[in-house]
Amino acid sequence: MIMIMKPIFVILLFVWALTGYGQNLHNHATIYIGASGVLYVSGDLTNNGLIVNNGDMQVGGAWTNNNQYDAGTGKITFNSNLPQIVNHNDQSFSRLTISGGGQKFFLANITIEDELVLNSGTLVSQNDAILFFSDGVTISDASDQSHIVGPVQHSGSGNKLFPIGNGSVYLPVQVNSIPSNAEVRVSTTELNGSTTLLKSNSLKNISDQRYFTLNVISGSLGDATLTLPVKNENSLSDMQSLVVAQALALHDPFASLGKSSVSGSLSDGSVTSELPLTGILFAIASADLSGIMVFNAVAPNGHEPNRYMRIANLPAPNKVSVYNRWGDKVYEIENYDDTISGKRFEGIATNGNELPPGNYFYKIEIGNSSPITGFLSLRR
């Protein structure tokens, strides 16, 4: 057993590592790093035994954990300006710091229990590995120079920050006011001109930069809202027309969730949705705020304001129809008015039957104008 309790022992261990293995350390026994101890390895560190970390462990090369790492209360830092491999064998870090400026490729899932410090360098997912955050984790210093490239999953309630990016641009996502313990996973996909997002008629333009995927792994989002980054969205109109848009699948049209607030500019800003989240894919879009806008998330058994289909700026006379996935008309009403129960769609068919949850399509007819069409999501 190698016990590291004081800095002098750390120096001795480091000299031994340089003498025996060059700049690398291969552990086949037990290393205990005490509260005031530091284990520094400038090269590769391979653990085939047990490392108990209640102090400070710094790795400049590849980290391969083939056996057991006890996170304790200690911190670990990956600090090279060159690419580093992090194969942590689906175990936990208590406190993790990313520095040095290089890419850190994590080959298996990692759980952060207490703290992630993103000083310099990116933490890049390989093999679809996921970075898990325990409830109450602290995240600091994320930036264009230091963020996570890959899926991030949070546990817990309240406001949750997802410090993701594309490797060169920091794209922070925040899910706001999660009401109860839930597990939520977020990732981003760059479009790079290969895909054009579809949009409903309530939107003027939609992002040509990227979209975000949000999956609820367990629990519920309730009335949670979503704050998305606005980065280099120069194809959109202006900040005041921005909304968060959602879709259930990539080839479905995105529809507006409105906005409760915006800040910054089209090159560097953010927008927060007004309505709760019922989709899976989300993007930044511009809406014609003077024209008709359909809020297409309907949850009759949920909370206001999504118990019915809201249609903003809808003039009279009008006719609104709803169709199921097979094209059968299930609801129709003249002079739709979302302020009056009985004059708005609340998940009830025209014949009075409760409609099952799923995807539906709407058609809005106003005079001789072309019909406005789109999809709506009905949840129970």
Image (spheres, helix red, strand yellow):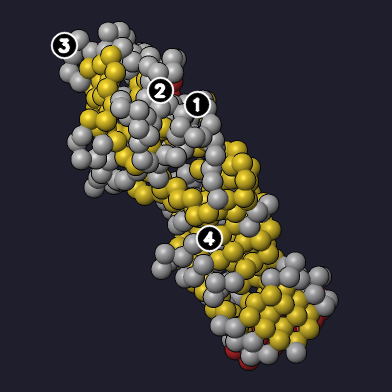
* Spatial CA span between label 4 and label 1: 33 Å
Tell me: residue 23, above or below residue 213. below
The local crowd at label 4, few if under 14, some if 14 to 19, many if 20 or more residues have their Cα within 10 Å, is many
Q: Amino acid at mark 1?
A: Pro
- Ranked by sequence position, the earlier of labels 4 and 3 is 4
Which tag, 4 or 1, sits closer to the chain's start?
4
Where does the image place residue 139, in percent across and percent down from the top left? 63, 51
Dot 4 corresponds to which residue? 131
- The answer to whether residue 174 is above or below residue 115 is above
Per the image, label 4 sits on a secondary structure element best described as strand
Instruction: Look at 26% across and 16% down and name the residue there.
Output: 319
Q: Residue type at mark 2?
A: Arg
Name the residue carrying label 1: 305
- Residue at which label 2 appears: 310
Callout 3 amino acid? Asn
Quadrant of image for the C terminus: top left
Tag 4 near tag 3, CB within 8 Å = no
